[in-house]
Image (tube, helix red, strand yellow):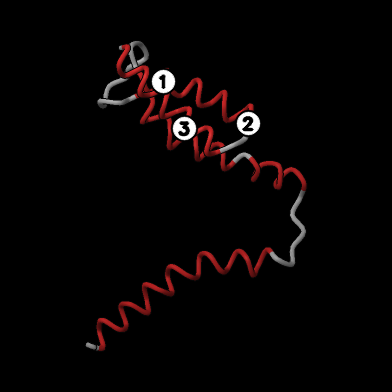
Amino acid sequence: MDRQILILILGTALVTYLPRMLPLVVLSRARLPEFFLRWLGFIPAAVLAALLAPGLLLPQGKLALTGNPYILAAIPAGLVAVKTRSMALTIVSGMAAMVLFQYWL
């Protein structure tokens, strides 16, 4: 293997590994304030909302609030998710709702 490629692979591995390892090492011995831990608890919901919002609200690249089967299917899926806390049931209900709303709209 060419030396330059090996250096590139090792450098890429290091750049990928360090940002994941350093916080674990540094914060494993530190006691974080309670407000910061509560704040960290909101990150998964914020990331999920940021990932879902464009797909639900901008299906063809334009804002679509009416006649949008994605929003309509997200409502029952969201209710199932809150009620059952089951990912499998949420996915199945969302898929079923999407099929129904696509054929009705």
Q: Amino acid at mark 2?
A: Thr
The residue that label 2 is drawn on is: 84
| Vertical side of 36 occupied by 71: above or below | above
> Of residues 15 and 45, which is closer to you in this image?
45
Residue 27 got which mark? none
Q: Amino acid at mark 1?
A: Ile
Q: Which percent across, then down, holds residue 43?
A: 58, 42
The residue that label 3 is drawn on is: 92
| Vertical side of 61 occupied by 65: above or below | above
Q: Counting residues from the N terminus, which is met first, the one under dot 3 or under dot 1?
A: 1
Q: Residue at x 64, y 45 (%)?
A: 40
Q: Residue at x 47, y 32 (%)?
A: 92
Q: Amino acid at mark 3?
A: Val
Q: Counting residues from the N terminus, which is met first, the one under dot 2 or under dot 1?
A: 1
The residue that label 1 is drawn on is: 71
Q: Which percent across, then down, holds residue 13?
A: 40, 74
Contact flag, marks 2 and 3 (Cβ < 8 Å): no
Closer to the eye: label 2 or 1 = 2
Q: CA distance from mark 3 to mark 1?
A: 16 Å
Q: Residue at x 42, y 17 (%)?
A: 72
Q: Secondary structure at mark 1?
A: helix
> Of residues 48 and 83, which is closer to you in this image?
83
